[in-house]
Amino acid sequence: MATIVTAAALSLVASVTTASASASGDATAQTCWATGTPNIDSYNDWGYGKVQKATAPLRPGPYADCGTRETLYKDAPMTIYCHYNNKVGSTWFYVSAYPNWTRGWIYVGNITWDSAEECW
């Protein structure tokens, strides 16, 4: 009988842990996509930049938890459409980056740039 109770208790703990992780992941995903794509046609002061580190992730949203859309390499050029200060105080740029000209977000500390207006 003790074995059955222990197994049931472990199953309950696993279910609660999984639910908590899913809720946290869903919240992050919603934040990533809610702020993910500014209308680039509304920005006239586009800038240019390049990756200053050995590698830098291009993300689908302006947060480190947003995953990686593509990995960029040192000196990769990019068109910078705008910048955004996220809710945790980090600055991100919405860019189109070489080699595939993929659009996404890159952290300010990973690039050098010449100009960019605010996204929102």
Image (cartoon, rainbow, N blue to C red):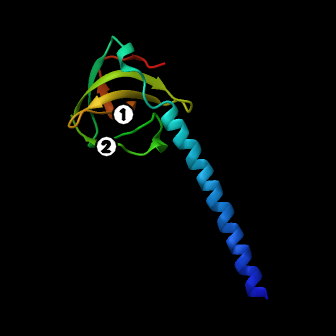
Looking at the picture, tell me which residue is in the foreground, 33 or 48.
Answer: 33
At x 23%, y 38%, the residue is: 74
Q: Which residue is mark 2?
A: 70
Image: 45 above or below 85? above
Q: Position of residue 15 (x, y in %)?
A: 66, 64
**Going 22% across and 37% down the picture, which residue do you hit?**
100
Q: Which quarter of the picture shows residue 93?
A: top left
Where disc 2 sits, the SS reads strand
- Horizontal and vertical percent for residue 86? 52, 29
Q: Secondary structure at mark 1?
A: strand
Residue 61 occupies quadrant: top left
Quarter of the image for the N terminus: give it.
Answer: bottom right
**Pointers 2 and 1 in contact (C-beta within 8 Å):** yes
In the displayed structure, 47 sits above or below 59; it is above
Whichever of callouts 2 and 1 sits on the residue coming sooner in the sequence is 2
Callout 2 amino acid: Glu
Q: Residues within 10 Å of mark 1 (few under 14, many from 20)?
A: many
- Residue in the image at 33% along x and 16% along y: 115
Quickly name the residue at label 1: 104
Q: Is residue 3 above or below residue 36?
A: below
* Extreme residue toward the bottom, this view: 1
Residue 50 coordinates in the image, percent (x, y): 25, 30
Q: CA distance from mark 2 to mark 1?
A: 9 Å
Which label number is shown at residue 55?
Answer: none
Left or right: residue 38 versus residue 115 is right
